[in-house]
Amino acid sequence: MSMLTKKALLKAFGTVLERKPFKKITVGDLTEECGISRMTFYYHFKDIYDMLKWALEHALRDSFPNASADFEGDWKRGFYKVFDFAMQHKYYALKILPEMGQSDMFRYLHDVVYRFAYNAILLYAGNRRIADGDLVFLAENCTYCVTGSLLKWAQAGMNETPEDMIRRFTVLFEAMVRGALERFDQEAASV
């Protein structure tokens, strides 16, 4: 029942978003659309942002059930899935993002993108002697790059294809990661 209620609230959000700007949507709008009490909403979520976070996490989890397994075969496919997911939800992204702000969206996307970036860096690192802190630092910076590019692309209207975005990002990512790993390995060898 809990999952049904959450999904009903999310569907109500989509319906209300058709009529109202994101910032003007209230919990009362959603509960009225669903025919449930405000107390039921607050049993499941602390606010509308919490509901959207749950929706994004739930959708991403469904889209990437085996993120590590997907990554082992082809890390580019993992990043492509992130951009493609955004494209599939373009209508909502374009209505919500301008009002929600980049920092909220960044927090929602960070964990998924970081997981892909970190696993890709591990593949590139191979058996080099790279400190864990350096791997994490590199993964965080790649995460900022991908997430920032994704958000800028969304804010610009998602006019470029996910394939174009991944092609450009692949060039940048491979150059940045390979160069950094080589330097970290050289540092480790000289100590």
Image: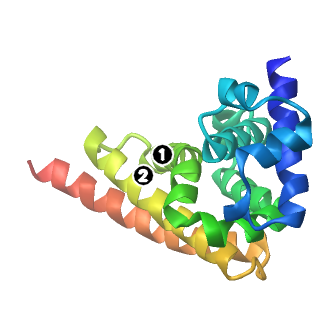
Viewer-side residue, 141 vs 43? 43
Is 155 located above or below residue 52 in the figure? below
178 vs 3: above or below: below
Q: Looking at the rendering, in which quadrant would you find the N terminus?
A: top right
User: Can the viewer see residue 128?
Assistant: yes
Q: Which residue is mark 2?
A: 139
The percent coordinates of residue 119 (x first, y second) are: 52, 43
Q: Amino acid at mark 1?
A: Tyr
Drawn side of residue 34 relative to residue 150, left or right = right
* Rendered image quadrant of residue 66: top right
In the picture, measured across the screen, residue 30 lies left or right of residue 50, that is right
- Amino acid at dot 2: Ala
Q: Please provide percent x and percent y for residue 145.
A: 48, 67
Q: Quadrant of residue 112?
A: top right
Q: How many marks?
A: 2
Residue 116 drawn at (x, y percent): 57, 47
Q: Which mark is residue 186?
A: none
Residue 69 in percent (x, y) is at 69, 34
Q: Nearer the viewer, residue 23 or 138?
A: 23
Q: Which mark is residue 118?
A: 1
